[in-house]
Image: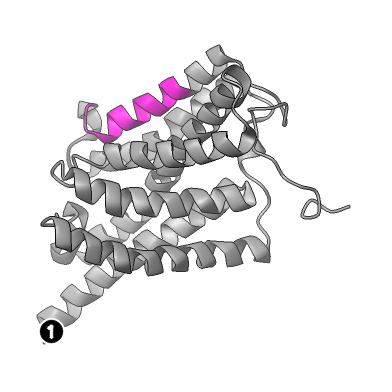
Amino acid sequence: MTEDVIERDYPFYRSDPVTLTSFQWLIVLVGVGLAVWVLLGHFAIFSQGYMGYGTSVLMTVLPLLGLILVAPRHWTALFRKIGWKDIGWMFAFAALNAVIAIPLGFLLVSLVEAQVNPGVDGLTTATNFDRTLFFLASLPQLMGEELVSILPFLAILYFLTQKLGFSRTAAVITAWIATAVWFAAIHLPTYNYNIIQCLIAIGGARLVLTLAYMKTKNLWVSFGAHVINDWMTFGLAVLASVFGSSA
């Protein structure tokens, strides 16, 4: 029987491949918290010039290190082999995210004045070298964003099912919504603390990206969808600036 036929379950919350204890989950979440702390610019050495790209690497290293410390032989359960079907799911969820962004965008502009991601403005005036560096540095950054979302998702799933007696379905839905709110919250400084924008736009996008993981139980898939979405967004901004300046 192939892996696709066997029903996959989420790792680390219920003996697949190992159940992490509450203390072990705490260690993992410390890694997540440190990654967010670095992301918000509290690690001075990685906040200036090209050294700022070190933040992207730490976003991946810190939460992953926490998981490796408590599950040294099993941390790879977050990642599964990528097949053509998985690549198809990456594009499918990226497309779903793009489609959902349209009505969410209309809802957003009807409620508040939306803030522009400063990364978009920076790319429109950057050199081609800096643009290339930005896109390359976004890869560990986006992997880090997946880790600081999916690891808390799994931690909540463990706590609700193993400690509070929630049903699996109720725990999954709760973790899905809670981590979308969490992901929106860590983007508040980026969007000038526009709470409504972060909840609607960022939280809505996170729901779709987490759904990619929920469908496949493969972090590579949600990461791939995230990369496609962000590269498309930033790529369109670059093209608009290039063709706009040459018009």
Mark 1 lies on residue: 246
User: The disc labelled 1 sits on which kind of residue?
Assistant: Ser
What is the chief secondary structure element of the magenta stretch?
Answer: helix
Q: Is residue 36 magenta?
A: yes
Q: Quadrant of residue 237?
A: bottom left
Please indicate whether residue 70 sits to the left or right of residue 65 in the image: right
Q: Is residue 110 visible?
A: yes
The span picked out in magenta is 29-42
Above or below for 132 versus 216: below
Give the x, y percent position of residue 122.
16, 57
Q: Is residue 129 left or right of residue 151?
A: left
* Figure check: 231 above or below 118: below
Q: Coloring scheme of the render?
A: one colour
Image quadrant of residue 18? Answer: top right
The answer to whether residue 121 shows anywhere in this view is: no
Q: Is residue 161 above or below residue 117?
A: above
Residue at (24, 62) in percent of width and height: 107
